[in-house]
Amino acid sequence: MMEDFKSIFEREYTWVEGYMRSVRRFGDKQAMYDTETGQSWTYRELDREVNRLSNAFKADGVGKGDVVMYQLLNCPVFVFTYVAAHKLRAVNSPMNYRLSAGEIAMNIDDSKPAVLIFEAEQAEEIRMAVKMAAHKPRRLVVVGGACPDLARTYEEYVAASSDSEPEVEGEHNIYDETTRLYTSGTTGRQKGVPLTSVNEVLSAHDVMIHFPMNHTDRTMNTTPWFHRGGLHCAGPCPTLYAGGTIFILRRFNADKCLEYVEKFAITFVIGVPTVLDALSDAQDRDGRDLGSLRGIVTMGSALERAACIRYQKTLTPYIFNGYGTTETFWNTFLRPFDLPEYAGTAGGSCVDDEVRVVKLFEDRRAEPDELAAQDGSEVGEVIIKSPAKSPYAYYNNETEAEAKFHKGFVYTNDLATWTENSYVTIVGRKDDMIISSGENIYPTQVEEVLNSHPKVKDCIVTSAPDRVRGELVTAYVVRSDDSLTSEELDEYCKESPMIANYKRPRYYRFISEIPLNVTGKKLHYKARAMAAQDLKNGLLYRV
């Protein structure tokens, strides 16, 4: 009997089986609406489009374990690709569409995709990336335009494909890798997070538990779907699994977002805190009817008390805030009954997770039971146990995995305090990572690019506070040639294939020496404090 249970559970408790249940149960119900084109798909129509792409992939030899990489804004083809890869037991790998050619090339060589799908507006970056990469995808497909010398259009690619269910060799299994997300690494190389089918199922369940969310919901995730929070927080993964309706917003626009909430009775909107700020401004101007909302969910940074009160008054009383990582999805959650009392904290652990704050040691990492005092004062490192949503691994990167995962916990490098009721407040980052407009930026990668300029002797990169973006990348530079200007460095970063445009410094200051410790290590925490003070004193130059 137990063998039967194990076999059925491992075969049937997959994300694609959950999606097919939605197709069978809700065939004539609206599954997806594209706000840019006004096109709508029922679950049955969506599944036919998915099958056309699945069969095109299959004709290209895509099968179990093969990678389908795509660099797309939020759009229908993103959804078709995500589901089609699941059906074929292939691996989804959505990429940040803001990456540079060099960064794209590194991801191509790391995952060796069989097929690469991209936006027409990214054609030149893709052309350069494919030229730089050692691995050559067997098929390039372009969406939203034509590049006849580089790729087939999406329409051409699926034109001759059947919309019948594709035949798949073998059986689906909950332990199959289904999605590989890339997250920022401490060097220029990003880390591949290999999610299994059961990780995706239980991520969907987590959303359905914590919102809660069900098949009557109509969701709009304003964040890019290539992020864990975009894909799994009321994005394609949980919404299609639950049988809800996705409303696609290709690029965020506050006025349009509120217009769609009112027009289509959207129930959940997801965005970073800066999105909520923009929505509040727009709502103050236009006064839309937002009565359909069951929640606005934010993530990426904590909600300040004053901002939280404003959002609850202006937008909806149902404000949620989640905290987590690409490796673990979200792991603490603030719900409306926590606010505004606990605004500014990251909340307490989610139902199936355990979040702790452990002590800091100069010579080693703390063990999971070496806890920081739960007094809201002692600063320690946040560690997360998330057995349902984390793969506890990186693809092809054992060194990073050993540093990140230990005894069932993920060591986040986030610094925090916590209280006796286990509410966590984030205060900084051990690794000096910069978060600007919700994007993770590591100073060492930017420093490497700046230091390759012939007129730069050395530099240190940090951030200065910014009301809109949270943080702005800031560079302190020691010149080897006094003719070097901030504008020259800005153009150099723009033209470099090794750094995405959003990672380039927005502030510069030329200095005579870099703050170092006795062993010669750059003191990024001192640079961060210096940047905050220099911004107040008007000493930073904005490019």
Image: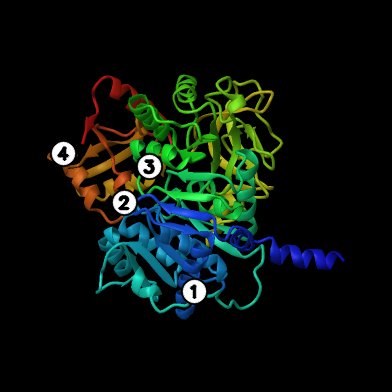
Q: What is the three-letter code of the residue carrying label 3?
A: Pro
Q: Which sits earlier in the primary sequence, circle 3 or circle 2?
A: 3
Q: Which of 206/451 is in front?
A: 206
Front label number (3 vs 2) = 2
Q: Which residue is mark 1?
A: 163
Which residue is found at the position 64% from the left and 63% from the top? 17
For marks 3 and 1 on the same chain, the one whose residue lies earlier in the sequence: 1
Q: Quadrant of residue 446?
A: top left
Task: Say which residue appears at 44% left-offset and 69% top-offset.
Answer: 113
The residue singled out by tag 3 in the image is 443
Q: Secondary structure at mark 1?
A: loop
Q: What amino acid type should be assigned to the residue bearing mark 1?
A: Asp
Tell me, yes or no, whether the two marked residues, 3 and 1, touch with CB atoms within 8 Å.
no
| Mark 1 or 4, nearer chain start | 1
Q: Residue at x 57, y 51 (%)?
A: 238
Label 4 sits on what residue type?
Answer: Thr
Q: Position of residue 150 (x, y in %)?
A: 28, 72
Marks 3/2: CA–CA distance: 11 Å
**Residue 401, how many percent across, how many down?**
57, 53
Judge depth for marks 3 and 1 and give the one in front.
1
Mark 1 or mark 4, which is nearer to you? 1
Residue found 55% across the figure and 65% down from its top:
86
The numbered disc on residue 485 is: 4
The alpha-carbon separation of the residues under discs 1 and 4 comes to: 58 Å
